[in-house]
Image (cartoon, grey):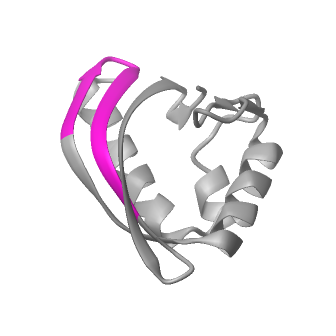
Amino acid sequence: MESSESIKLIRRFIEACVRADPDEFAGYFTEDAVRWNSPGQPVKGREAIRETLRRGAQAMQALPWEILRIAADGDVVLTERIDHFTVRGTHISVPCMEVFELRDGKISA
């Protein structure tokens, strides 16, 4: 993919994260994708990734996330963000850095 297209895909994915629809979320991943949300263990496969989001959405509500910086080199996209959530009525903001590897227009890692 062109870098600009890769960035557009990841921006759409981040917007989908906030909606927390497990099917929409999982649709961004390849069948054999690996998602590692540290400090947890890597989650392997689209169905396991879908289930992880479903369980997480029961415990918290995602609020709009802030992208501070985003850069791409072909099929690799880097984001620096602040992810916002509400957990049991408490607002939480989590600064994070994420690396996305893309394959065939989907997230593979």
Q: What number of labels is visible?
A: 0
Q: Quadrant of residue 24?
A: bottom right
Q: Does 6 sit above or below residue 54?
A: above
The residue furthest top is: 73
Q: Nearer the viewer, residue 14 or 65?
A: 65
Image point (73%, 31%), residue name: 41
In the picture, which quadrant includes the N terminus?
Answer: top left
Residue 16 among those drawn in magenta: no
Which SS does the magenta portion mostly show? strand
Image point (66%, 71%), residue name: 59
Magenta-highlighted residues: 69-84
Q: Does 5 sit above or below residue 9?
A: above
In the picture, which quadrant includes the C terminus?
Answer: top right
Q: x, y (%) of residue 105?
A: 50, 34
Report whether 21 appears left or right of 48.
left
The residue furthest left is: 68
Q: x, y (%) of residue 48?
A: 81, 45
Q: x, y (%) of residue 37?
A: 58, 37
Q: Nearer the viewer, residue 29 or 53?
A: 53
Q: x, y (%) of residue 50?
A: 73, 54
Q: Does 63 sit above or below residue 65?
A: below
Image point (75%, 42%), residue name: 46
Image point (58%, 71%), residue name: 60
Report whether 43 appears left or right of 15.
right
Q: Nearer the viewer, residue 21 or 43?
A: 43
